[in-house]
Image (cartoon, grey):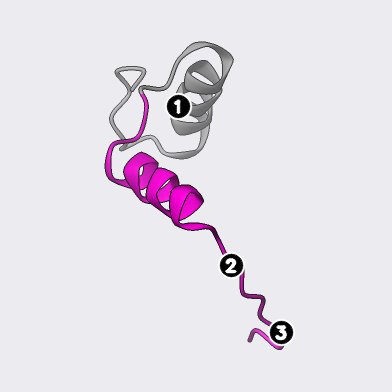
Amino acid sequence: MLKESETLVLSDHDRDLFMSVMQNPPELKGKLKFAIYKYRQKYHKGWKTDKT
């Protein structure tokens, strides 16, 4: 159960940028993409394993 919460107030520009990235996330690349692939292989045998 959460006992505390925080509110982050963004400028209009920052809010628009955040929403844009949430709606159109960049393609994963490099070490982060590989780390997710390895994690899925190890802990989620039924998951898609095409390195995406």
Q: Secondary structure at mark 1?
A: helix
The image quadrant where one finds the C terminus is top left
Label whose residue precedes the other's in the sequence (1 or 3): 3
Do the residues under discs 1 and 2 have CB atoms within 8 angstroms?
no
Residue 27: x percent and y percent? 36, 22
Residue 30 relative to residue 1: left or right:
left
The residue that label 3 is drawn on is: 4
Q: Nearer the viewer, mark 1 or mark 3?
A: 3
Which segment did they paint magenta? 1-26
Do the residues under discs 3 and 2 have CB atoms within 8 angstroms?
no
Residue 50: x percent and y percent? 29, 18
Label whose residue precedes the other's in the sequence (1 or 2): 2
Q: Secondary structure at mark 3?
A: loop
Q: Which residue of the protein is positioned furthest toward the top in this rendering?
A: 30
Residue 21: x percent and y percent? 38, 40
Q: Secondary structure at mark 2?
A: loop
Q: Residue at x 31, y 37 (%)?
A: 46
48 vs 19: above or below? above
The residue that label 2 is drawn on is: 9
Residue type pointed to by label 3 = Glu
Residue type pointed to by label 1 = Gln
Q: Residues within 10 Å of mark 3 (few under 14, many from 20)?
A: few
The residue that label 1 is drawn on is: 41
